[in-house]
């Protein structure tokens, strides 16, 4: 099979990019509009705006200040909460998934195959199914209204990332592990000093996906954290809805949403090389 | 430096596969011993049991007078060089070499160093000691200019040298090498072999070395251990093994080109015995006792030479010139013989010619079950 011509490839990629980037662009446009034009854009009464007529840069400061009931406090609280929860979840997921993946890849014990299958099977379970049992469990532990239900499960691994780590670690030559044993390391030492540094591409994928998933998570914080000062950014965005569930200030919601998205975009760009490398590796050998 | 003693050592894998059985071996202080054999013969498994990377199912291994059966690899006072080098890809050459020592710091761990000034001093002194050890090993192997490079920036030969350096830095009682040269090209392999030999002489250390290449074994070893199907066939110096192989397997395995084997029926010949095969008959050395009606003789290719009326007459199948000598393959009735001749003697011979080969005498006679007779 010959590869398609370069111009055709370019055209297809450009068309695809437009489809994916248009919603983002529309968000940016609406976030810079006046309240009236933004409202019109929402209802579509004024057609689809492709360019802000009179960019309102002040929308951003206003949006952040209006998040929550006290000016700025709501945003700063939500930002701090998001950072704390996301950091804990990313660190927990990377550490636990790589450790468990290493164990599945390198340790032989009776029943490891069965356990691995059971672990993979948990991926088939939709989150909604476990929501209520988990809520009851955490309530029993007295963890409601704390960040523990959000952070602690991350330290018990994620089935998909455990699988990815295991596949990657299986390709690490056994002799490296043996050399580390001769050099005086136990299993934990080998994992920390040899395996984890070698797993950088998988760690990049795991960290980026987990970061994006946790940063944008709405359901978790909504279910477990009830006080306004505990909100994360994803939940705090909800404050732009009025008491009837409608939207009065769509331009502010878009501006706040864009600010909320920013760390994810920056992280993705920063980790892009590792990320793509890891995905490609997973695709070829995993 | 230390002795390594293996007593009735065996390895049985789960499922009952017996990889090694009844290995008795005494590696002396400062000896260079090579375990050799075809793949699957148990040589690597034996070495890995000495290293502690493989559990010992039966028997006892002693290193430096201490039974090590249940001792972790890091506490056996050994260093191992692996076939694929096993350098940590994310560490510089210097860190690779220092890694084992860093782990073994006796004073001033990093955490303690952070907390107390006296530990900081100890930590610095220890770091300095490690640096000197690494520098010393690097000088010995000519690795100084490479110390800050990453393994991926090195050639195969350089990586191998780093792997050896990493072992030297640890100053172990016993060096273990698991086919360390098999990933190198032929020329580099020859060079590294010489270097290892020199290194052994300089360090005077006990070394155990595994290879499937009998030439490498002959070139390096003080003594060679030939293994087959998990059982030691013979232990001896390279010359002993070459001149007096205890069975047909060792005879065939040691020496290039492979020894010629001629099978036949044993018959009386005056006071002694003779061997008769389809194409001829040869008198066996006096005083030799053969059990059974059949036996075989082994003839080294370099002992054969064209003669006017030798015991082997046949047509030349192929001639391979190798510079100063040539390998001539002759098909005599029922047997194919390889003769290694000096080039001048092979010059007049053409493929298809009929020639007669003879040798000074029969050096190796084997029983029907392959054991050396006499």
Image (spheres, coloured by chain):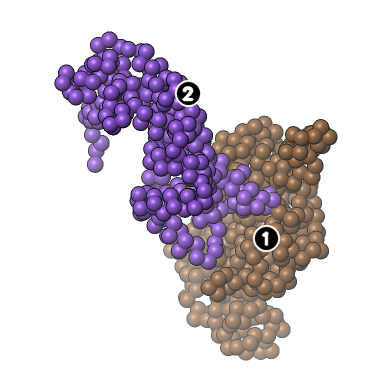
Q: Position of residue B316 (x, y in %)?
A: 47, 64
Which residue is at the front of the view, B95 or B248?
B95
Q: In the picture, which quadrant includes the C terminus of chain B?
A: bottom right
Give the Cα distance between marks 1 and 2: 61 Å
Residue at the image point whose x is 57% and y is 70% from the top: B13
Q: Residue B200 carries which label?
A: none
Q: Considering only vertical position in the picture, is A213 above or below A97?
A: above
Q: Considering only vertical position in the picture, is B38 above or below B74?
A: below
**Residue at image mark 2:** A73
Which residue is at the front of the view, B66 or B134?
B66
Residue B215: name its quadrant. Answer: bottom right
Residue at the image point whose x is 17% and y is 23% from the top: A44
Which residue is at the front of the view, B163 or A99?
A99
Q: Where is residue A191 in the image (x, y as percent from the top left)?
A: 59, 48
Q: Which hue is chain A drawn in?
A: purple
Residue B189 visible from this viewpoint: no
Side (left or right) of B261 relative to B27? left
Which chain is painted in brown? B
């Amino acid at each position: 099979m010959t590869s398609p011509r370069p111009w055709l490839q370019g055209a297809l990629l450009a068309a695809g990019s437009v489809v994916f980037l248009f919603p983002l662009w529309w968000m940016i446009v609406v976030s810079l509009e006046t309240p009236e034009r933004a409202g019109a854009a929402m209802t579509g009464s004024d057609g689809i705006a492709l360019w802000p007529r009179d960019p309102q840069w002040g929308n951003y400061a206003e949006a952040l200040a209006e998040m929550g009931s006290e000016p700025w406090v709501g945003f700063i609280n939500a930002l701090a909460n998001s950072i704390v929860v996301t950091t804990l979840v990313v660190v927990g997921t990377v550490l636990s998934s790589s450790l468990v993946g290493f164990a599945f890849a390198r340790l032989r014990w009776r029943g490891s195959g069965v356990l691995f299958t059971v672990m993979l099977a948990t991926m088939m379970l939709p989150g909604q199914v476990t929501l209520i049992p988990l809520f009851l469990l955490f309530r029993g532990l007295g963890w409601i209204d704390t960040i523990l239900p959000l952070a602690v499960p991350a330290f018990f691994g994620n089935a998909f990332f455990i699988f990815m780590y295991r596949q990657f670690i299986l390709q690490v030559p056994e002799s490296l592990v043996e050399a580390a044993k001769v050099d005086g390391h136990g299993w934990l030492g080998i994992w920390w000093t040899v395996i984890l540094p070698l797993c950088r591409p998988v760690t990049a994928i795991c960290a980026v996906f987990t970061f994006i998933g946790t940063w944008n998570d709405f359901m978790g914080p909504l279910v477990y954290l009830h006080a306004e000062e505990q909100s994360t950014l994803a939940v705090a965005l909800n404050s732009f809805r009025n008491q009837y569930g409608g939207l009065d200030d769509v331009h502010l919601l878009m501006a706040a949403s864009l600010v909320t998205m920013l760390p994810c975009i920056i992280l993705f760009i920063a980790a892009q090389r590792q990320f793509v490398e890891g995905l490609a590796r997973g695709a070829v050998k995993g | 430096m230390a002795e390594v003693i293996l007593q009735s050592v065996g390895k049985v894998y789960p499922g009952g596969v017996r990889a090694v059985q009844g290995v008795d071996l005494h590696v002396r202080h400062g000896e260079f011993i090579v375990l050799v054999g075809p793949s699957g013969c148990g040589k690597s498994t034996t070495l890995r049991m000495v290293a502690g990377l493989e559990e010992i199912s039966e028997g006892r291994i002693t290193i430096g007078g201490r039974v090590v059966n249940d001792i972790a690899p890091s506490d056996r006072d050994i260093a191992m060089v692996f076939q694929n080098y096993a350098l940590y890809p994310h560490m510089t050459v210097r860190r690779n070499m220092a890694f084992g020592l860093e782990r073994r710091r006796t004073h001033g761990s990093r955490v303690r160093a952070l907390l107390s000034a006296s530990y900081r001093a100890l930590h610095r002194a220890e770091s300095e000691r490690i640096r000197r050890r690494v520098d010393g090993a690097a000088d010995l192997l000519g690795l100084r200019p490479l110390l800050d490079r990453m393994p991926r920036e090195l050639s195969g030969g350089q990586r191998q040298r780093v792997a050896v350096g990493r072992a030297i830095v640890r100053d172990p009682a016993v060096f273990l090498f698991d086919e360390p040269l098999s990933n190198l090209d032929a020329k580099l392999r020859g060079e590294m072999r010489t270097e290892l030999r020199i290194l052994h002489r300089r360090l005077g250390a006990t070394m155990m070395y595994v290879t499937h290449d009998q030439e490498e074994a002959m070139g390096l070893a003080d003594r060679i251990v030939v293994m087959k199907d998990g059982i030691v066939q013979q232990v001896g110096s390279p010359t002993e093994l070459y001149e007096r192989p205890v069975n047909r397997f060792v005879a065939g395995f040691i020496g290039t080109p492979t020894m010629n084997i001629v099978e036949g029926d044993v018959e009386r010949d005056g006071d002694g015995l003779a061997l008769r095969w389809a194409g001829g008959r040869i008198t066996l050395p006096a005083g030799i006792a053969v059990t059974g009606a059949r036996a075989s003789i082994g003839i080294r290719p370099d002992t054969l030479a064209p003669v006017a009326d030798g015991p082997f007459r046949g047509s030349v199948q192929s001639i391979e010139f190798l510079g100063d000598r040539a390998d001539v393959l002759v098909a005599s009735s029922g047997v194919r013989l390889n003769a290694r001749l000096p080039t001048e003697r092979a010059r007049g011979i053409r493929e298809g010619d009929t020639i007669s080969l003879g040798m000074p005498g029969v050096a190796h006679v084997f029983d029907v079950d392959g054991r050396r007779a006499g």
